[in-house]
Amino acid sequence: MAHLKSFPNPSKKRAPENKRAIARSLAATSKGSCSQRDPGRIISKLGNWAHYIEILNSSGSVIVIDDISKRFGGISAVDHCSFRIETGRITGLIGPNGAGKTTLFNIIAGFVRPSSGRIWLDGEDITGLPPHHLFRRGLVRTFQIPREFGRMTVLENLMVVPPQQVGENLFNAWFRWRRVQRQERNLQARAEEVLQRLNLIHLRDQLAATLSGGQKKLLELGRTLMTDARVILLDEPGAGVNRTLLADLMRFIEYLNRERGCTFCIIEHDLDLVTRLCDHVVVMAAGRVLTQGSMEEIKQNPAVREAYLGSVALSDSLSPSKPSSLPSEGSLS
């Protein structure tokens, strides 16, 4: 059986060279500066130049959230939010309920258009692109409530993921059925290998609707191994998952990050999980970025203590003397 390392490693792909969006913005700015003699407008446009060039040169960032706002009527769910998701790292996004975390995820993943601001992926402006376009660029997300195909088997839920399959074309299904069968055999072998790594192989023929909540989240994360995903957004992967399955889930995230170079951004309320997995943590409150840094720096920040959990609760939950409820680190067999 081929090892999963033989699958395409998205981290080894060249970043997209398409910078037309920035070039068009710079060209428009240059044209406007020549036609407008107002010094204030020229200075403002030169400032935009510097901002675009900074984004263009942010080689360590796979995603740049650039002054994003989203209003629903008179309510600002996200309010001028800016931060970066670094390539090959696991970034945590924490904050109280109603902080705007999931709305921001929906904007990044193309489910919601922002009221203002831009999202950049590898230096390309992807603001407002639909989810299926972002999927082809290697950006995927999971949901707090798993969205499996309940009337399909666990194996079929994985096999259906890869895009542009030969059998999706009616002509191929009728007249090139040998080619269709050959691809399906390859996909089945790959899906079975993913299930083996997820410790779900014994459930391969079971309907996905009958899985437990934790098993569904493992299955949803396993779909990323059926694609060339480079950036994975996880919305509360630990919610409602028992500690045994949560340990498997965390080890699988660590495997994808370490062995395949996948970049993660994780919304999570379980601070033990965030402390163990995340290299960098962003704290949101009332739609804004309150602060960001390592978990140790977050723990010492008095504004976070007051706005997120309260000084006593945050201190207790992250105290070094408090034994973690999570199993020790290991690797999936």
Image: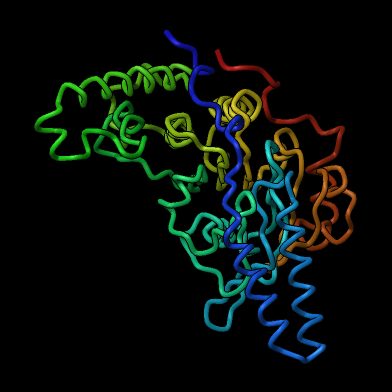
How many numbered marks appear?
0
The one nearer the camera, 161 or 244, is: 161
Residue sitting at 38 percent across and 20 percent down? 190
Q: Is residue 273 visible?
A: no
- Residue 31 position within the rendered picture, expressed as x and y whole percent measured from the top left: 66, 79
- Residue 154 is left or right of residue 194, and the answer is left
Q: Is residue 189 visible?
A: yes
- Residue 327 is left or right of residue 128, and the answer is right
- Name above or below for residue 127 compared with residue 192: below
Quadrant where the C terminus is found in the figure: top right
Quadrant where the N terminus is found in the figure: top left
The one nearer the camera, 286 or 1, is: 1
Residue sitting at 68 percent across and 63 percent down? 66
Residue sitting at 57 percent across and 83 percent down? 74
- Residue 302 position within the rendered picture, expressed as x and y whole percent measured from the top left: 89, 58
- Name above or below for residue 229 compared with residue 61: above
Q: Residue furthest left?
A: 174
Residue sitting at 14 percent across and 33 percent down? 173
- Residue 165 position within the rendered picture, expressed as x and y whole percent measured from the top left: 29, 35
- Residue 120 is left or right of residue 134, and the answer is right
- Residue 312 position within the rendered picture, expressed as x and y whole percent measured from the top left: 84, 52
Q: Residue furthest front?
A: 34
Quadrant housing residue 70: bottom right
